[in-house]
Amino acid sequence: MDRDSLSQSVGIVLREARVKAGLSQEALADRAGVDRTFVGRIENGKQSPTLDTLARMAQALGLRPSEVLRQAEKRSPVGYSNHRRSEVDSNGDSD
């Protein structure tokens, strides 16, 4: 999958969850221990969060990081999870 499309999808999922939770970017940033401008860059797909940052942001929004990624995969133009399953199925293993 194109990294940019996944990054953008993660940002969209985080923005929607933040808005649904009634939080400003600043409030989410405070809860997650990051700068407000960083939240904006992630939401706009300009920057990707580290796994630790994703976990903190997800927790601040009452989500699991895996749920954020699952929702982002569904939004991405390329079906990453389906692509990986095809590789596993055709090879007979997950390596």
Image (cartoon, helix red, strand yellow):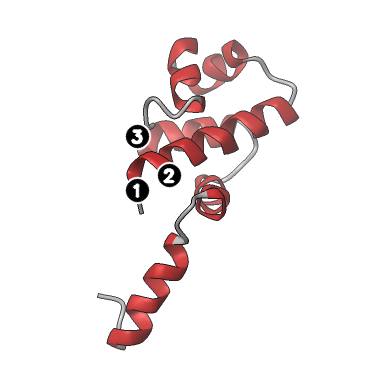
83 relative to 30 in the view: left or right: left
Amino acid found under the numbered disc labelled 2: Leu
The image position of residue 74, as x and y in percent, is 56, 55
For residue 14, which quarter of the picture?
Answer: top right
User: Looking at the image, which residue is at 39% across and 31% down?
Assistant: 49
The image position of residue 69, as x and y in percent, is 50, 49
The image position of residue 56, as x and y in percent, is 48, 31
Q: Nearer the viewer, residue 39 or 1?
A: 1
Task: Identify the residue position indicated by label 1 in the image.
Answer: 2
Near mark 2 (Cα within 10 A), the count class, few <14, some 14-19 or many ≥20, is many
75 relative to 3 in the view: left or right: right
Circle 1 — which element?
Answer: loop
CA–CA distance between discs 3 and 1? Answer: 17 Å
User: Looking at the image, which residue is at 50% across and 11% down?
Assistant: 36
Earlier along the polypeptide chain: callout 3 or callout 1?
A: 1
Q: Nearer the viewer, mark 2 or mark 1?
A: 1
Judge whether 2 appears above or below 55 on screen: below
Mark seen at residue 50: 3
Amino acid found under the numbered disc labelled 1: Asp
Marks 2 and 1 close (CB-CB < 8 Å): yes
Mark seen at residue 6: 2
Amino acid found under the numbered disc labelled 3: Thr
Circle 3 — which element?
Answer: loop
Near mark 1 (Cα within 10 A), the count class, few <14, some 14-19 or many ≥20, is few
CA–CA distance between discs 3 and 2? Answer: 13 Å
CA–CA distance between discs 2 and 1? Answer: 7 Å
For residue 41, which quarter of the picture?
Answer: top left
Marks 3 and 2 close (CB-CB < 8 Å): no
